[in-house]
Every structure is written in C-alpha cells, then in structure tokens.
Image (cartoon, helix red, strand yellow):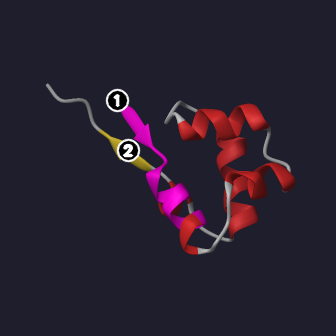
Amino acid sequence: MAVSYKKLFTMLDERGLKKYFLRQNGINPKVVDSLSKNKNVNVSSIMDLCKILNCQPADIMEYIPDEN
C-alpha cells in the first residue's frame, strides 16, 4: 500500500506556490520532505495542509494499492 502526494505538488504549482510556502505556514520541514518522497505522514499534518490550502484530503493525496 502506498500514498502519492503528487496532487499536492500539482496544486501548489497551479497556485504559484513552492514547498517553502508550506514551511512558512507551520508545516515542519521533515513533513515537507516526507511528502516530497511520498512517505507516510500523520493525519494531523494532512489536516494542517487542508486548512492552509482550503481543500479536502483527496485533493492532495491518492491511495495507490499494491500490485499483487
């Protein structure tokens, strides 16, 4: 099971924002790094992102099922 945050970075790009914007708005640099590498982050970080970007979790992340 994997998660992709490609939608998040596409949204930032469409809005003319950089990763630095997330750090400026209280997202820990380690979390930003984890997002960049499609690693797991906690739900509170997802909630913070949604609040900052005024969006829903599905707008910034996607579940990628394992290939069996």
Q: Residues within 10 Å of mark 2 (few under 14, many from 20)?
A: few
For the N terminus, give its image quadrant.
top left
Residue 54 lies in quadrant: bottom right
Q: Is residue 62 visible?
A: yes
At x 62% / y 74%, what residue is drawn?
15
At x 49% / y 62%, what residue is drawn?
10
At x 80% / y 48%, what residue is drawn?
23
Above or below — where is 18 with respect to 53? Answer: above
**Mark 1 and mark 2 residues within 8 Å of each other at the beta carbon:** yes
For the C terminus, give its image quadrant.
top left
Q: Left or right: 52 with respect to 24?
A: left
Q: Is residue 42 visible?
A: no
Residue type at mark 2 is Tyr
Residue 67 location (% of width, % of height): 18, 29
Residue 27 location (% of width, % of height): 79, 46
Residue 29 lies in quadrant: top right
At x 25% / y 30%, what residue is drawn?
66
Q: Left or right: 1 with respect to 59?
A: left
| Residue 30 included in the magenta stretch of the image | no
Q: Nearer the viewer, residue 5 or 68?
A: 5
The residue where tag 2 is placed is 63
Range of residues picked out in magenta: 1-12
Residue type at mark 1 is Met
Above or below — where is 47 with respect to 40? Answer: below
N-term-proximal mark, 1 vs 2: 1
The residue where tag 1 is placed is 1
